[in-house]
Image (cartoon, rainbow, N blue to C red):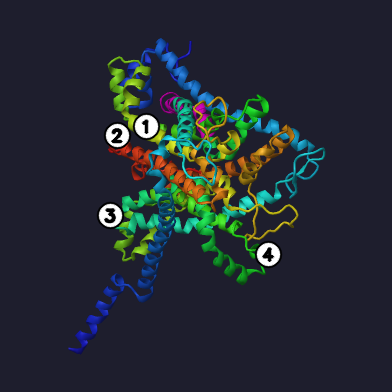
Amino acid sequence: MTAVAENKPVYDGQALDLTGKSGARAFKNTLATVLIVLAFVIALIPLLWILFTVVSKGYHLLLNAEWWSQSQRGITVRREGGGAYHAIMGTLIMALITAAIAVPIAVLGAIYLVEYGKGTKAARVVSFMIDILTGVPSIVAALFVYAVWITVFGFNRVGFAVSLSLVLLMLPVVLRSTEEMLKLVPDELREASYALGVPKWKTILKVVVPTAFGGIVTGVMLGLARVMGETAPLLILVGYSKNINLNPFDGFMGALPTMINQDRTELALQPAADRVWAAALTLILLVLVLNVLARLIARFSTITSK
Amino acid sequence: MSSPDGTAPPDRPAEEPAAATEDGTGQKLDLGPVGHLGDRLFAGLARGSGGLVVAIVAFVGIFLLALAIPALADDQSSFLFSRIWEPGGDQPRFGIAAMFYTTVISSIIAMLIAVPIAIGVALFVTFYSPKRLAQPVAYAVDLLAAVPSIIYGLWGILFFAPILRPVIDGLSNALGWIPLFEKPPGDNVGVVFTASVVLAIMILPVVTAISREIFLQTPVAHREGALALGATKWEMIRMAVLPYGRSGVVSASMLGLGRALGETVAVLIILSVPNGNDPWNSSIFAGGETFASKIANNAAEFDSPEKTGAYIAAGLVLFVVTFLVNSAARIIVARSGPGGKRPRRNRRAGAPATEGASS
C-alpha cells in the first residue's frame, strides 16, 4: 500500500511539474499583467486629461451663435465677445486649397505606382522620394516655401503659401494610403474589364478607382486632419488677422492654430483664455469629425471591410 | 512610339495569346488597346505625377542647399561644433551644436519614455483587453494622434509642467551630480525634460499603432504552441510575440523618434529660451531650443538672405537627421525578422487608420 502510494506521487509530481506554475513564474506573469494594464492606464490619462481640460474650459463659448458667425475684429484681449469665424474659414480655405493641389497629384502618383510603374526602377525612385517626403518635418517644409515664395520671388506672406507647404505634408499621406487601397483591388476585376475590351485608362477610372474609392476618401480625410492641426507653417508663412479674409492670395489670414497662438501669452486675462480654449476645442472638433468620417467611410467601403 | 506601360512593346501581338493563357497577372494587365489616345494621355498624367513627386523632393533638397551654402561660406565659426548663434551682421557666427544637442536629447528621452508604455498598450490591446474593449481602446489611443500639437504644447506648459515640477526636483536632488541631471538655478518649468515627456505622449499613438499591428501578426501557431507547452501568458508573449515583433517595434520607435525630432509647436511653447548671457547648460532640467523651435521662434529674423540661409542650413541638418532616422526604421523593417515581411492585406485590416497623426 505504501509502495503504491509512494509510486503515484512521483508520477503525479512530474505531471504537475509540466502543467502547474511555480511560484516565481506565476508571480512574473502577474507582474507582467499588472505592468501592461498600468501602461494602458498611463497612456489613457493624458488623453482624458487633455480632452477634459479643453472641453471644460472651451465649451461655453462654442454654445454662442456668435462664435460661429463673427470674427475677432476690433476685439482686444481684455474684451469678451467676437467669434472664430475668421479662423475657421481660414483653416478650411487653406486646407481645401491644399487638398485641391495634393489630392490629384497623390492619387495619380499612386495610380502610377500600382498600375503603370509596378516593379520598375522608376517606380522605386518615386517610392523612395515619397519616403523622404513622409519624413520632412513641417518646419522644414515651411522653411522651403518661405525660401521660394518670399526670399526668391519676393511675394508677400499669404494663405496660399501656407497651402503650398501643407501640400508637401499631405501628399505622402494621401499617396501612400491610396496606393495601399489600389493594391487591394483584385486583379480579377481588371482582367474582367480588359476581357471586355475596355482600355486600360477606362479600366482604372471606371473599375479600379471606384472600387477603392472609400479607402481613397479615408486617406484624404486623414491627410486633411493632419494638415489642419499644423501650426509651424502658419507661424512662418502667414500673419494672423483678426478680420475675416477669404482671399488666400492677399493679406494675412486667421486660422485656428494661430488664433490659439495669438492669445496664449495672455492667458491671465479671462476673455483671452476663454477664446484660446474655445479655439482649441473647435480645432479638435474639426479634426475629430474628419477622423470619425474617415473611419466610417473605411468601415463601409467595399474593400477594407472584406 | 513606346507603349504607355514601358513594359510591353505594342508590336508584339503574337505573344499576347500565350501571355493570356498563363496565370501570370503582370502580363495580362498590358492587354488593353495600347496606343489609344486616352490611354496615352492618362498614362502620361500618372507618370507625370510620379515624376512631379521626384521633382518636388529634388527641388526642395537642391533649393535648400543652394540657399544654405552661401550662408555657410560666410560663417565665421564652426557650423557643426559652435554653440553661438549670431547669423546677422558682417561677421556672421553660427553653429548648431546647442540645438543639435537639445533636439537629440529631448527626442531620445521622449522615445525612452514612450516605447515601453507603447509596447504595454499594444500588448494590452492585442492580448489582455476583453475583445469588446479592444477596438474602442485602440481608437482612443489613435485619438491622441488627432489632437493638434499646439494643444499639447498649451496643456503641457499650463497643466502638466506644474505636476512634473516635483519629479524634476526629486530627480535633480538624487542625481544632480551627473551634469545631465544638474539643477540649474531658478524655478523654470519650461525645461527639456518637460518637453520630452510631452513629446513622449505625442509619439505614443504612432509607436502603439505600429506595434499593435505587428503583435497581431504573430502566427497563431507560435502563440498556441507556447501555451500548449505550459507557458504562462507572459512567457508566451516573451517567447513568441516579442521576438517576432522585435524589428517592427524597433522601427516603430525610430519612426516615433523621427516625429519627435521634427516637432515644432509643442516644443516651441514649452521650452523656455535661455537668456543669451547665461552659460550653456547641458542639463535636461534647463531650457533650450531645438532646431524646429529655433526656426519657428525667429521667423521674424528672415529679413536678409544671409540670415535666412543660416536658418535654412539648420533646417537642412534637421532634415538630414530625420531622414537618417526614418531610413534606419525602414531598413530594419525591410531586412530583419519575420515581422518585416508581413502581408499587406492583413496590415490594413488590423489597423485601418493610423495616418491621422498630426505632428
A66 relative to B210, above or below: above
Amino acid type indicated by mark 2: Ser
Q: Is residue A4 above or below residue B69?
A: below
- Pick the residue in front: A75 or A251: A75
Question: Quadrant of residue B320 in the image?
Answer: top right
Q: Which residue is mark 2?
A: A301
Prevalent SS, magenta region: helix
State the quadrant of the N terminus of chain A: bottom left
Residue type at the position of mark 4: Pro
- Marks 3 and 1 sit apart, C-alpha to C-alpha, by 28 Å
Q: Are marks 1 and 2 in contact (CB under 8 Å)?
A: yes
Q: Chain of mark 3?
A: B
Amino acid carrying mark 3 in the image: Lys
Residue under numbered circle 4: B185
* Cα–Cα span, label 1 and label 2: 10 Å
Task: Judge the density around disc 3: few (<14), some (14-19), many (≥20) Cα neighbours within 10 Å.
Answer: few
Q: Per the image, is A219 magenta?
A: no
Which three-letter amino acid code belongs to the residue tagged 1? Val
Q: Mark 2 near mark 4, Cβ–Cβ under 8 Å?
A: no
Disc 2/disc 3 C-alpha distance (Å): 23 Å
Contact check, label 4 and label 3, Cβ < 8 Å: no
In depth, the one of B317 and A81 nearer the eye is A81
Mark 1: give few (<14), some (14-19) or many (20+) Cα within 10 Å. many
The location of residue A185, given as percent across then percent down, is 33, 30
